[in-house]
C-alpha cells in the first residue's frame, strides 16, 4: 500500500531531523541513479514491467526485484541508505530506509506516482531532484515514526561523530567500566535465552525459601561442582549478542556467571545467595525480581570485563564492535533471504507434483524437511537459515 502523507507537526526535533537528512548529498557510490529512475519511468509509460530479460523469462518469476541503493552521506552525520526494489504484484517501487545498519521503515511508491514525479523530458535534472526531495521527505516521516515507536532514539539518529570527537578532546574520558555497563544496559534479554522465567522462579525459591522444584533439581543436586543451569542472551543496542552462562556453585551455594562474546569468555563473577535474597520483593513480584537480577548481573560483570580487557585477553574495540558478522553488506541479506525463499518455493512446487503423480519416495521426505526448516527459520527471525559467520557459528 502506498504511503499516504500525514500532516507533520513541526518541533525542534522534527527540524533537526529534517536538516540532518536534507543537508546530506546523494553519494557517488549509489547504485540507484538518475538513469535508473528514468529507465523505470519510461518502461512504466510504455505499459511494460520494469524487469530485465532474465527476470521476465525466469522459471520462478520474482515478485520483488532489487533495483539498487541510494546512499546519503555528508552533513557531519552517519551514512543513510535506501534499498530500492520493484514489486511486480503491487505495481510499486518499494523503498527500505536505513540509518547506517538500523532499519527505519519502508514505503511503496505506485507506478502512477513515479510517472507523475518524472517528466517526459528525460534530460531534465529536476526529475531526479524532485524524486530525491520526495524520498527525503518520506525518510523524515519514517524517522519520526521510528522514534515514537522506540526503533531508534533521536540521539542515535542525530549523532554527529565530528562533534563527539571534539567533545572527547576537551572532556575527560568516561571510565571504561561505565561505558561497558551502559552498553550492556542498552541490550535486552533475547527469546533465544534458555533460562526461562519459570526456571528463574525456582532459583529464587531455592535461595529465599529453601524449596526446590524439578526444573532445576538436577543442576542443584548434581555431583558436579558447578552444574550448568541455563544461559541468558543479551542482544540489541546496536551491539554484538552476548551470552551469560549460569552455573550453581555448590561450594558457595551461589550462582557462577560467565559472559561470552564472539565465542570468547570475557568475564566471570560469583553472585552469592544472599545477593539474590536481597532482591526479594515483599509481594513476591517475579517480574521486578527478574529485572533487578539482570541489572545486578550486568553491574557485577562489567568490572570483570574491564579486567579481561586490561589483561589483553579481549580487545576493547572488539567489545564495542557493531559490524555484521553474518553478512558483508545489506545486499547479502536480501540475496540470502530471496535465494532461500526461492528454494523453498521450488521444493514445494516439486512436492505438489510428486503428490499429484503419487510418486512419493525418500526425496519427498527430504524436500519436505527443507521446507519446514525454512518456515521454522522465518518464525525464529530467519536465524537458522542465515549463513554462519567467519568462525562458523552464530556466536562468533
Image (cartoon, rainbow, N blue to C red):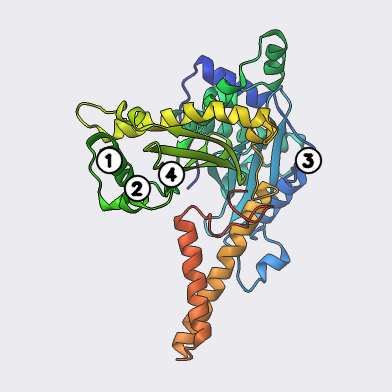
**Labels 3 & 2 near each other (Cβ < 8 A):** no
Residue matched to label 3: 29
Is 293 placed above or below 94 here? above
Is 3 placed above or below 277 here? below
**Labels 2 & 1 near each other (Cβ < 8 A):** yes
* Mark 4 crowd level (few <14, some 14–19, many ≥20, 10 Å Cα): many
| Real-space CA distance between mark 2 and mark 1, rounded to the nearest whole angstrom | 9 Å
Residue 375 drawn at (x, y percent): 47, 63
Q: Which of the two discs, 1 and 3, labels the residue nearer the N terminus? A: 3
Q: Residue at x 40, y 39 (%)?
A: 251
Q: Name the one closer to the observer, 384 or 260.
A: 260
Residue 260 located left or right of residue 4: right
* Mark 3 crowd level (few <14, some 14–19, many ≥20, 10 Å Cα): few
Residue matched to label 4: 247
Q: Which of the two discs, 4 and 1, labels the residue nearer the N terminus? A: 1
Which mark, by number, is residue 220? 2
Residue matched to label 1: 206
Residue 104 located left or right of residue 58: left
Residue 202 located left or right of residue 56: left
Q: Which of the two discs, 3 and 2, labels the residue nearer the N terminus? A: 3
Amino acid at each position: 500500500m502506498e504511503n499516504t502523507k500525514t500532516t507533520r507537526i513541526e518541533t525542534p526535533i522534527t527540524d533537526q531531523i529534517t536538516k540532518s537528512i536534507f543537508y546530506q548529498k546523494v553519494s557517488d557510490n549509489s547504485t540507484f541513479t538518475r538513469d535508473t529512475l528514468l529507465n523505470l519511468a519510461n518502461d512504466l509509460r510504455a505499459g511494460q514491467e520494469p524487469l530485465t530479460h532474465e527476470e521476465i523469462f525466469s522459471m520462478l518469476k520474482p515478485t520483488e526485484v532489487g533495483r539498487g541503493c541510494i546512499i546519503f552521506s555528508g552533513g557531519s552525520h552517519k551514512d543513510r541508505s535506501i534499498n530500492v526494489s520493484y514489486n511486480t504484484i503491487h505495481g510499486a517501487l518499494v523503498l527500505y530506509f536505513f540509518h547506517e545498519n538500523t532499519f527505519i521503515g519502508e514505503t511503496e511508491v505506485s507506478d502512477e506516482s513515479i510517472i507523475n514525479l518524472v517528466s517526459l523530458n528525460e534530460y531534465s535534472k529536476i526529475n531526479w531532484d524532485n524524486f530525491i526531495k520526495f524520498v527525503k521527505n518520506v525518510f523524515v516521516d519514517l524517522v519520526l515514526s521510528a522514534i515514537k515507536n522506540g526503533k531508534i532514539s533521536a540521539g542515535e539518529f542525530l549523532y554527529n561523530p565530528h562533534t563527539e570527537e571534539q567533545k572527547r578532546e576537551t572532556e575527560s574520558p568516561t571510565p571504561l567500566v561505565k561505558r561497558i555497563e551502559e552498553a550492556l544496559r542498552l541490550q535486552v534479554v533475547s527469546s533465544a535465552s534458555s533460562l526461562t522465567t519459570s526456571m528463574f522462579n525456582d532459583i529464587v525459591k531455592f535461595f529465599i525459601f529453601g524449596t526446590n522444584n524439578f526444573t532445576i533439581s538436577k543442576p542443584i543436586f548434581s555431583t558436579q561442582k558447578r552444574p550448568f543451569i541455563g544461559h541468558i542472551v543479551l542482544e540489541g543496542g546496536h551491539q554484538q549478542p552476548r551470552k551469560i552462562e549460569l552455573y550453581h556453585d555448590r561450594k558457595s551455594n551461589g550462582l557462577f556467571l560467565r559472559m561470552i562474546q564472539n565465542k570468547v569468555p570475557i568475564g566471570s563473577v560469583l553472585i552469592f545467595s544472599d545477593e539474590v535474597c536481597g532482591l526479594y520483593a515483599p509481594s513476591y513480584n517475579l517480574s521486578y525480581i527478574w529485572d533487578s537480577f539482570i541489572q545486578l548481573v550486568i553491574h557485577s560483570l562489567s568490572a570483570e570485563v574491564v579486567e579481561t580487557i586490561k589483561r589483553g585477553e579481549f580487545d576493547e574495540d572488539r567489545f564495542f564492535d557493531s559490524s555484521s558478522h553474518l553478512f558483508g553488506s545489506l545486499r547479502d541479506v536480501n540475496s540470502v533471504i530471496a535465494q532461500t525463499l526461492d528454494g523453498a518455493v521450488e521444493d514445494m512446487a516439486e512436492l505438489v507434483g510428486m503428490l499429484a503423480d503419487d510418486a512419493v519416495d525418500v526425496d519427498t521426505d527430504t524436500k519436505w524437511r527443507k521446507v519446514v526448516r525454512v518456515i521454522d527459520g522465518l518464525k525464529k527471525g530467519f536465524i537458522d537459515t542465515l549463513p554462519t559467520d567467519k568462525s562458523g557459528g552464530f556466536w562468533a
